[in-house]
Image (cartoon, rainbow, N blue to C red):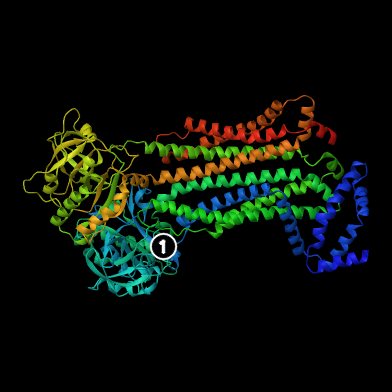
Amino acid sequence: MRWLSKLRLRVRSLLGKPALDRELDEEIRFHIERQIEENVAAGMEPEAARRAALREFGGVEPIKEECRDARGVTLAHDLVRDLRVGARQFRRSPAFTAVVVLILALGIGASTAIFSFIDAVMLRGLPVRDPDELVVLSWRARTDPDTRLSMTGGDCNGLETSPMARVRGPGPGAAGCSFSRPFFDQLRDDRGLLAGLTAFGNAPPLLVSGHGSPQRAYGQLVSGDYFAVLGVGAALGRTLDRGDEQRAAPVAVLSHAYWLRAFGGDPSIVGRTVRLNGALFTVVGVADPDFTRLTPGNVHDLWLPLSVRRLIDARWDQIYEGNASWLLTLVGRLRPGVPAAQVEAAATVAFRGNVLGAEGPLLTAADHPEVRVAPATSGLTGARVQYRQQLLVMSVAVGVLLAIACANVAGLLLARAGSRRREIALRLALGAGRGRIVRQLLAESTLLAVAGGALGALLATWGVEALVAFMSQSQSRPLGFDVAVDGRVLAFTALVSLTVGVAFGLAPALRATRVDVASTLKEGALATSGVRARLGAGLVVAQVALSVVILVGAGLFLRTLDELRGVDPGFRTENVLLFDIDPTLAGYPPPKIDALYRELRDGLADLPGVTSASWSEARLLAGAGWAATLRLPAPARIVDVDLLRVGPGFFQTLGVPVLAGRALSAEDIAAAPAGGDANANGTRTAVVNQAFARRFFPGRSPLGEGFQFDGRGPEPTWQIVGVVGDIKYSELRRDVWPTIYVPSQRRGVAFEVRTAADPMRLVPKVQALVARLAPDLAPTDVKTQSDEIDRLLFRERIMARLSGLFALLALALSCLGLYALLAHEVARRTREVGIRMALGARDGDVRRMVVAHGLALTATGIVLGIAAAAAVTRSLGAFLYGVAPTDPVVLASVSGLLLAVAFVACYLPARQATRVDPMLVLRSD
């Protein structure tokens, strides 16, 4: 019947069923290994012990070889079998498998999420045709030009906010990327210079009405060839063209996202009209959905021709379109074969003629004005400047976290390889080749890495969504970046983890296949080399040191956030509801604005739960504000101050104390001139803060003193009628600056409403009140003052939250690595511990031995980590407030936390070591 059994096995193997492997692994192998152990223990040589065991169990090896010959084993079959055997190995040790896969997933997921966000914000190209051909123009000069008005929409923040290099000689230098309309027209008409040139600038705030409730929108004013130069088409209808700049009937193009959000994706919107700030516009198209923005982070809802500015901005003056008003950003497309230097030279000639030859020259020839051309991909920075430093710090932190995860996986694989030396020796004793064992262990490491990468991809997707949601909470507009899990980033981080897994799985395998089979079987399953133990200890020390760096950084950011939240702003921030309203967008005249504000204030004050209400032309602690230059008499001097225009009851609503004189009254507000015209009785009243009085009127009262605004013509005199307490105006980090408060001038304002309970419960009633008093208006950006401060502290909050998350993960990974190392050490030294206890060692002695070893490794890592953190955190000074980079409280807290958690991680294996039975150890010996 032996030939029948062999035939059955051969047939079953040809059918592709794993019958032989299953039978060998689950039934015969156990008995063969036990018999070999008994034979070796009886004094037989390993080879003789193997042959004797095989003879006793009917010659399984010859049957196996026959079946292999019948199959014609291929590499693919070997790989499948290795993976199957590896999966069975992991099922036998689920805890080890789960820990390794989770560590890899955390490292891959966190790294992929952060680096995907960095790619979207800092590295992603422009969503236009051939973006490498686009260039952005900027100017340089030795001094600032004498412009009437100069601004951009934040498209070239890198040029506008940082000092430029010196331009052909000494001097601080000036630079920018905004140009005048005449210069743009001149440059666009030069057909031989560029293949195309377009201009754009921010539109004023837009109130969209005519389709449901009025709502705010963000627009951009562009030249008619904007879409043609960028190579962007329409998803519906058409885009703008040059003719739209001269058409009597104004037109608009909607962004695809705004079309879906505001009009529900209705295709009939093309050809219909909408009302923008009271003017009728015809919608001619919807832009391509792939065109989400040109400048990174600057998202717009619709695009309008440059010529319609006067229709949507009541304060617009034709003078703003002259040579002295620089409001446009210019982007051009290079002609094939025309170098950028040639464009710069021709544009510089035109620019000098424009700024030197105009009436009232804006610059002199000695200023050496010139035009520079830069790739639009890097020149249009936009919101990148806002995130650059934070993302750089986060990229370092997540890189450290990935290194900790890789070191942890390496340590676990090393420990597992040491515990499998006896298994490998048994495989060798059974006749397995060294290459065969190496392939098997390599397949197991690969399987772990693939499982960790798959779970890491899921965590990365969730992490990106959570990161975008958190970022969006602190933005009044859409985030403006196309953030999604980047396949290249995921592949890179997965490759790093796979390399670590394979490398640290292969190295022990190669070493293990060179063992002396007989001596290894006699030593026991848990013997390991000193080299491997030292390498594992080194990995633990490295993990602890890296964790200290992340923990110290997180501690500094948390303390900074706590310090800023503890800053006294000088007014009561709790239970204050804020909302914006701008009647000028609907064309309200000044008398109607005055009446509306009075009615709104009275109506808000009558709502249940409201204690007071007022308004101001800028929100406090919103990151922005107004400034002014004053002329003060006795002694005559010109000073710079902060300026805030407020309504009646402003200081009462916010809880700001009046220290001397009086606050601005309703009569002061009603008598205030609009646009600088003199009022009926010729008086103007103002209130100053305590810092103003201390600096400019030391030792005496400023009440009754006068001042003038420093303008180009004669200015009326304002009289100081009160002094109020100091309050933080634009930022918490900024010191209180001398500030003047003057009556509001009938512009768009922010209302402040103080309530007795949760102010957000009042929102529906506020919306209903505005809808009743002004049906063509709507309150926007509704939030509490506390939420406004949180938005101001957005950078600090994101740094604290992300670094705190990374710190917790690093702490958990480091302690897990320490626990795994000590658990393995205890298992490896079971024989030693048993002998010690047999010789009289007590449980406490054994526990102290294990715990002391673990705490020594931790202390070494802490010392190295503090030294590294002291060097790294010095670069974080710009992010910190009220705390030094080497704050002793943070360093001590991190050290204590690590030692406490490490003690727990050490105590668990130490307690396990005391459960060793000395008699069993000595008997097995």
Total numbered labels: 1
**Percent from the top left, x then y, of residue 210?**
26, 67
Confirm whether residue 170 shows in the render.
Answer: no
Q: Quadrant of residue 346?
A: bottom left
Residue type at mark 1?
A: Ala
**Percent from the top left, x then y, of residue 822?**
68, 37
The quarter of the picture where the C terminus appears is top right
Confirm whether residue 736 shows in the render.
Answer: yes
The quarter of the picture where the N terminus appears is bottom right
Q: Is residue 4 above or below residue 597?
A: below
Q: Is residue 544 left or right of residue 608?
A: right
Q: Is residue 91 left or right of residue 473?
A: right
Q: Is residue 426 left or right of residue 373?
A: right
**Percent from the top left, x then y, of residue 823?**
69, 38
Q: Residue at x 45, y 67 (%)?
A: 130
Give 51 or 94, whichever is nearer the viewer.
94
Report the residue marked by disc 1.
340
Q: Is residue 102 left or right of residue 442?
A: left
Which structural element holds mark 1? helix
Give 682 or 631, whichever is nearer the viewer.
682
